């Protein structure tokens, strides 16, 4: 569970690949996943290499995923909302916006 003293704010639940993830309003999707111990955010199309949070400022593409139906969204720049639906790309899907 997330420590209230470290991360103040109302608790929210987002769903990552259908699984509930607890977070605090104000966190980004990437930091919410890191706080839960999830280090791999996606896999590359060619080779299936794992990718995690790299720049954390929206410059690279290592944290792109589908968030609330928007493909190619950067998890490091997107703040969590209660009920948010997040889908991590498989190595067979493109991470690029449609």
Image: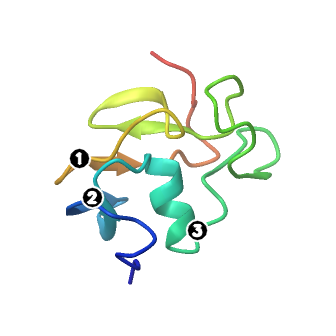
> In the structure shown, which secondary structural element does the residue marked by tag 1 occupy?
loop
Q: Residue at x 31, y 70 (%)?
A: 22
Q: Residue at x 49, y 32 (%)?
A: 77
Marker disc for residue 81:
1
2 or 1: mark nearer the eye: 1
The quadrant holding residue 94 is top right
Q: Quadrant of the N terminus?
A: bottom left
Residue 45: give x, y in percent of width and height: 71, 39
Marker disc for residue 14:
2
> In the structure shown, which secondary structural element does the residue marked by tag 2 occupy?
strand
Q: Earlier in the sequence, mark 3 or mark 2?
A: 2
Q: How many marks?
A: 3
Q: Residue at x 64, y 46 (%)?
A: 91
State if disc 1 and disc 2 touch (CB < 8 Å). yes
Up-down relation of residue 91 to residue 73 (above or below): below
Q: Earlier in the sequence, mark 3 or mark 1?
A: 3
Q: Residue furthest bottom?
A: 1
Up-down relation of residue 9 to residue 68 (above or below): below
Residue 27: give x, y in percent of width and height: 41, 51
Residue 84: give x, y in percent of width and height: 24, 48
Marker disc for residue 38:
3
């Amino acid at each position: 569970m997330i420590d209230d003293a470290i991360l103040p704010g109302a608790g929210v639940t987002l769903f990552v690949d259908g699984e509930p993830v607890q977070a605090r309003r104000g966190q980004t999707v990437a930091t919410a996943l890191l706080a839960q111990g999830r280090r791999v955010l996606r896999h590359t199309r060619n080779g299936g290499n794992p990718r995690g949070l790299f720049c954390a400022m929206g410059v690279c593409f290592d944290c792109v995923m589908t968030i609330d139906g928007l493909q190619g969204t950067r998890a490091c720049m997107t703040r969590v909302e209660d009920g948010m639906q997040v889908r991590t790309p498989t190595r067979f899907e493109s991470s690029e916006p449609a």
